[in-house]
Every structure is written in C-alpha cells, then in structure tokens.
Image: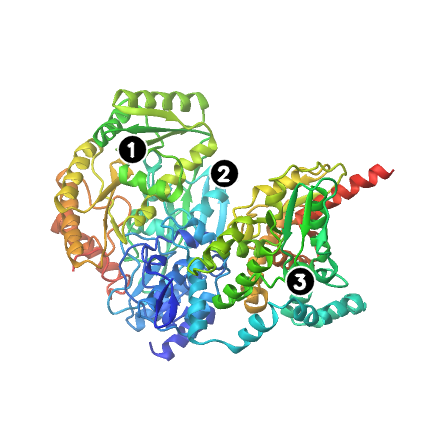
Amino acid sequence: MESRLIDRFVDVVGKAGVLHTPEDLAVYSYDGTFAEGQPDLILLPETTEQVSQIVRLAGEARLPIVPRGMGSGLAAGSIPMPGGGIVICLTRMNHILEIDTQNATVSVEAGVVTADLQREVEKHGLFYPPDPSSIRHSTIGGNIACNAGGPRCLKYGVTGDYVLGLTVVLADGQILTTGGKPIKDVTGYDLNGLFTGSEGTLGLITGALLRLIAKPIYASTALAEYNSLEDASCTVNAILSAGILPATLELMDQTAITCIEEAMHLGLPTDVEALLLIETDGADQQTVDREIEVCVKICQVNGARSAKMAKNEAERNSLWKARRSISPSLARKAPNKLGEDITVPRSAIPEVVKRLRAISARYGLPIVIFGHAGDGNLHPNILFDKREPEQWAKVEQMVGEIFATSLALGGTLSGEHGVGVLKRPYLENALGPVSIGVQKQIKNALDPMNILNPGKIFPI
Amino acid sequence: MNQANGIEKPDESAYLNCIRCGLCLAVCPTYREYLKETASPRGRVALARKNLEGEMELSSNLVEQMYGCFACMACNEVCPVGIHPADLALAMRQIQEQLHPASWKQTLFAGLIPHPGRMETATLPLRLYQISGLRRLVYTLKLNHLLPAQLRDLEAMLPHLPRRPLRPALPQVTNARGDTRSRVGFFLGCAQSLMFAEESSATVRVLARNGCEVITPKDVQCCGMPASGYGRLDLVRSQAQHNIAVFEQYNTDVIVTDCATCGSTLKEYGSILADDPIWAARAQDFSSKVRDVSEYLMEIPLEKPRGRVDLRVTYHDPCHLRRAQQVWEQPRSLLGLIQGLEFIELPEADWCCGSAGSQLITHYETSRRVMDRKLDNLANTGAEVIASGCPGCQMQLLSGIRRRGTPVRVVHPVTLLDEAYEAGDGKQID
C-alpha cells in the first residue's frame, strides 16, 4: 500500500493502531475456519469517530473494508477476499459505557468480550443470556454482526433479541444510531434487525445498547446417556412437547464425547452413542427442580441408559466446560474440520440425524453430530485432512448434501454462524431469486461502491 | 523435535491441528493488554507454522513475536487440541539461535550464569550498593525518582539483599532435628542464593525441623531456564547433565527446591534428555525425584506450627509452579496450617505477574501493563502480605509494590511457616 495513504491512516489512529508488517498481515488473514486471505493493512481504531474517518478515507481510495473482532468466526466472514483491503479490527473499542439498572440495559462498545459483558452485568443482578461457545474469545460486535446464538437460545432467544439500539458507521462514513431504551418502538423500519446479522456488509457496528433481564437464580443440570443416537434425538421432542422449556437441551454423539474425554478427562462415558445435556433455570428452586426431574423421567422412558442430575456446581461447570470444548477438541481427530450449523424445525431432528449418518457412511468421512438440538440447530462437523485432495473433494460434496438435507426438511443453512464466504454457493437454493434480489437492493442502497466486506454472503 | 540440515525443529504435530478457534486469546496476558493478534498465542502458532512450512522467512520481527511470549503457559493449558503455543514460541527461539547464534548469549548463558562463583562476583556491586547504605541514601534523597521509569522499576525489583550469597554460607549437610526420616537434596537456585538467601535458609530450617537431613551440593550450575528462554537448548542440556551428575553422588531420596522456576526445569530434565541414550534414564530418575518445597512438605508428616502469625495473606501462583508443575493446592495448604493467618484468595491468582524471567528488562512496557493487572487484583484483597514461591515473581511484585507505594510485604510461603515455627519456639522459652 502507498505510504502516503498509510500516513493518512496513522493520522487518524496513531502509529500503534496501524499494522502492516508481513507478520501482522499473516496473522490477520484467518478466522476460526481453515480459510485465508491476506489484508493490505490492519487498523485498530479506538473510537467510532476514528472508524468513520477510516471509512471515508477507504471510500476515497476504493479500498475494501473487512471488519473484525477477535476472529473466532466460523463462516470466514472476516477474511479479506483476493484483492486484499483493510481490516478494521475493533478489539480496542472495549469499554462498557453504562449499565442502567432501572431500564435493565447496557451500553457497550463493539470490542467488549461477551463473557466480560456478562460478568459485569451479573454484578448488578442482571443477565445477558446469549452464550455462543466462543463467549470468552469473541466480541459483542461480532456476535451482533453474525447474530450469534448458543445453547441458552432455546429458552432466551438469540443475540438479535437483545439488541435495542446500535451505533453504525455507514459506507460513506456517516454515523447512524438506531433504536433506544424503549422496549417497544415501531417508529420507522426496524434498522436494528437490518444490521444485526448483516456480517459487516451494510455498515460497521461500533456500539450497541442491549436489553438485559433478571438473572435466573437457580439452575439444575442433568446428563442422560443413550445407547442409541436416535433415541436421544427423539427425547428432545418428547421433552419439549411435555410443556417444559429447558434453558438448554444439547445433544452430542459418540465421536464428540470421545474427543472431549481425550482433551479434558472429565469422566464422560465413551461407550454410549449419545448424550443429552439438559438444564432448567428460573427464579424458584422448586420449579427448577421439578422440571429437571420431569426431564430425567422423560429421558428414561425414551430409552436413556441412565439419566442423572449434576450433584453440585462443580459438576455442572465441568459439564458445560465439556460442551463448550466440543468444537475445538474435534481437531484432535483430524487436521481440519468443517463445522456447519444447519437448523431444522425441531420435529425433524431425528430424521436429520439419520440422514447425516447416511451421508457420512456413503463418503467414508466422519461427521460428528452435536448441537443445540432443542432449537433444531445442529453442528455436523466433517473431519478431514485438507492436504489430501481426494478428501477435500468429498468434503465439498458432503457439505452440499448436508445443506440439501436441511432444506428438504424445511430447515436453513445457518442458525448462528452466518453465511460469510463458506455458505455463499448454497444461498441461491436456500433463499430463491426474489429474496436474494431484495437483499442485493438493500446492499446496493447502503453500500453503492461495494466497499463494506465485499464478496461476503451473496453468491458470485 | 526432528533434524533437518542439522537444525533441530519441532514436529508438525506442534502446530498442524491448530484450528484457530481463538480460545487461547482469552487467557493470554500479552494479547489481553494489546488486543492484537500478533501478540496472541494463535498468532505465534500461525507465524511459526508459516516459517516451518517455508512460507515465511525467520525475520527479526517474526523472532521478536516469539520473544513477546511471556511463557506463562496459560495457552498450553487451555488449548482443546493439545497444542502448546508457549512451547512452540520457545522452539522457534531455539531455531533462531541455531541458525544465527548471538555472541552475547554465549557470554551470558555459557560464560556467566552457570558459574555460581562468577555470578557472586558479578552481583557484588549490588550488595555493596545496599550494604554501604547508598541505597538508603538514594531513597531518602528520592534520587531514584531521577532515574528513567524503567531503571527505577528495575532498581525497585531488588529485594533486601543478603550481606553475602547463601551458597558459600550454607553448610553442605544440615542435620535433621530429631530423628532423620529422609535424606533430602536441596537444589539452591541462583536467584534464591543471591537475592533471597534468608528465604532459602528458612526452607532448610523447615525441612530439617521435619526430619530431613538436608544435603546442599555447592557445585550445581544454573537449572537452565534462562538459557532455555533465550533459545540455547544446547546449554540447557549440558547444565542438566552437570546437575544430574552432581546429585547422583549424594544418593538422596528426593531433590527439593524452593524456586518455582528451578523446579519446573529440573522436572523437565527427563524429557529434555529423552533422546540421549547415555542420559535418558539418569535424567528420568533425577526428574522423578524433584519436588517443590511446598509439594514435598505436604507429602511428609509435618509438625504443626504452634506460633501465631497474625497477618492478612494472599497468594500469587507462579506460572512455573501452577502450570508447569500443577502445584497450587500445597502452598495454600501450608499457609492454612498457620494460626492467626487470615488467607484471602487473590482474584486471577494464576494470571502471569509479568516477570517471565527478564521481561521487565526486555519488554518493559508489556511487563508493566501485565503487572498492573496483578497489582489491581492485589489491592482488592486488602492483604498485608503476598506470598509466592518464585524469585522472579517476588522481584516483579516488589518492583510494582514499591512503584505504587503500597506497604505490602512479598515473601515465600515457606518463610511464613518458618516464622510460625520460630514464634512457637519463642513461646516455649517464655
């Protein structure tokens, strides 16, 4: 990049906020996937105003802008496309600006780590429920830009359900603020909804006002072991049809369990085909306990080999630590993994599990199945070695079949990771030409020069 | 490790399965201060991989990123795949030294540090600075405020130095008080001898009191950690061999050290020399005998201290003890034995203090920022004393505490146990 242009960026964010050594460029070329693409420059702004000035400069120079937080994304959404561009990394905008206990809201900058946000509001008895597995190594800005989910979404909803307002830097550098503290607001279009999940293609989210709820005081966790994966998936519907809404209802198959055990030695049974991890929570101990007991009974009736409640907080924590580690610990089995997050109507869970296993058997590559079965969101992970061209070819075909399966059962491509680069080829099938046409018009209206995270979401 | 063109390099298993999940970013002290990927374990693994696979040269900036790691090993512990980013950063420093050996490292790590006598001479000016009263004068006249910030912080690192190093002063054999129940080899570390002689004297007293005949060989060399940190694995190996041979002469039941760093290195001799047919078994045998003093004291029947130590005490986990040796319950248990002592758990007790050996010298800004996090946590406890069984951590804490002007005492946990014993003995005399 021209040094004159670099100097102009230095004027905006200072020397310490501009990175461009070959080593810097190399480490900002990846996210939580196997994909890579090198930027020309990395900028680490500390204020919305700085972001606005950067965007204006980039616009003048027609430079692609790739927004990024801690780079834990699973759709290659924050990776520069061929042709490079500038990465705007918002990790240094990490201040919690206000916790309003009366209105139960929190105002944050985009770079706040989600776990830090939760810890701070919990000090005031408040609760921010969304809990993506990357909670300790992802930022709230990234969570909003991808509309992140997590286990607790079954009961509490996704990130977008907590967005009351946003600060967004638009493609021309203007600063837009949306929404506000009122819970109900139908004045104009729902711009919060528009920018949430837009993956940095419509504007750069630099701040957010989030809704909080009262922190549930009690929680009970149960673990059910199954000799049959199908029985486990059938139990999910049995529980939800019984009028109980657990906070979480997580499924993991044998390979997932084995991987966690190898990584963490928690004493999980590795001889079962599946585990269900169930948690109920609320403000009243009796209700929480009664509900978990009913869940345990339903598990037993539906073929669980054993179903037990966690004895204490330590046991509960270790179960959740295990659940959060599944995805990364799969890498013990193979150099690469491709984790999808298809979501189907929950009645289709047993069927989708059956079909995923058939795909795995047909291609001879393992598909690990785990996920938030309660809301129909599964994470089939294909394990492979990208250095083997034959395997890679199979993987591409398998992904196509996984998506086709989800769509055939009335599901979607992605429940919480987003489209990014990796799911672009399948978008047409999922949405159809009319929907894609509308979305392209929105993109074009907000970013006519196509400088905001170009190449993401839309099929080329 | 594998050999290519005579250069030892890590196997591909050291990086291949990194899926770049980013979990290590959450626990890395340098990432959390700078919030940039280049200062993160995942970034270091990516750079190491690119170099080892021939995509990037071993530039001075790339090597600098490897030296930017504080080797606290938090990433090693958290990695769900089982990759050890901190170890990989060390391995990259070793490659650099094999390709382009730095002559000052030869002088420092081969010529000076392994030789206790030379170290004692070299540090004489520091002792004179204190013994002569010059240091008190500097503080009275506030001359230290004239120093640049980094020098001032380095000056503040100096503990109250012993009049002379402990190595020549400590008897080679200290008899057990009462019946001899075990024969203990004491590995007296360089920093303990030169800086914290009173603490190691206390360690020997506590061991002897609990039925240990303590043998302190005088001809040991540096454990090897400094050379390891600067990429000289060859020197670590020769120092390991020397120390193993020294202790073999005494046939002790265990080898105890009161330095977390020494302990972690001594326990690694077995793996450091695993590929050496002559030394592998001897090194394995040596390492299996090594114990941190708190670890060993909790293994043996321990006399309950009768004296009181009325202090509010907190404890900082040295990385070389908590993560390298999995020793963290024992020092807390030891403190729990002392009557009158009110123990307050330090928030983020196992977060690196920023010492990392020499980072206050080589990475002053980062080291200070990491230390500030520790000092904030310390202030929240309201403790009068912070215990930690590592001279590096102790010096770092001393420096920070003096800079902030908070009256908190820094001490080895076993020294507090010794004080409780002494107080109990005092009572008997009354």
Which of the two residues, A166 or A29, is positioned nearer the viewer here? A29
Q: Quadrant of residue B137?
A: bottom right
Q: State the image coordinates of residue B146 (x, y, percent, origin top left).
A: 71, 72
Does residue A173 appear anywhere in the picture?
A: no
Query: Is B188 situated above or below A118?
Result: below
Quickly name the residue at label 1.
Answer: A271
Q: Quadrant of the C terminus of chain A?
A: bottom left
- Marker disc for residue B157: 3
Front residue of this view, candidates B371 and A193? B371
- The reply to the same-chain question for discs 3 and 1 is no
Q: Is residue B172 above or below residue B425?
A: below
Q: Secondary structure at mark 1?
A: loop
Dot 2 and dot 1 within a common chain? yes
Task: Evaluate whether residue A330 shows in this view.
Answer: yes
Q: Which x, y percent locates residue A340?
A: 24, 47
Q: Are marks 2 and 1 in contact (CB under 8 Å)?
A: no
**Quadrant including the N terminus of chain A:** bottom left
Distance between the alpha carbons at the discs numbered 2 and 1: 50 Å
To which chain does the residue with label 1 belong?
A
Which residue is identified by label 2? A102
* Residue at 52% from the left image edge and 49% from the top image edge: B288
Cα separation, mark 3 vs mark 1, equals 55 Å
For residue B73, which numbered disc appears in the image?
Answer: none
Nearer the observer: mark 3 or 2; the answer is: 3
Badge 1: how crowded within 10 Å, few (<14), some, or many (20+)? few
Q: Is residue B409 left or right of residue A340?
A: right
Q: Tell me which amino acid carries mark 1.
A: Asp
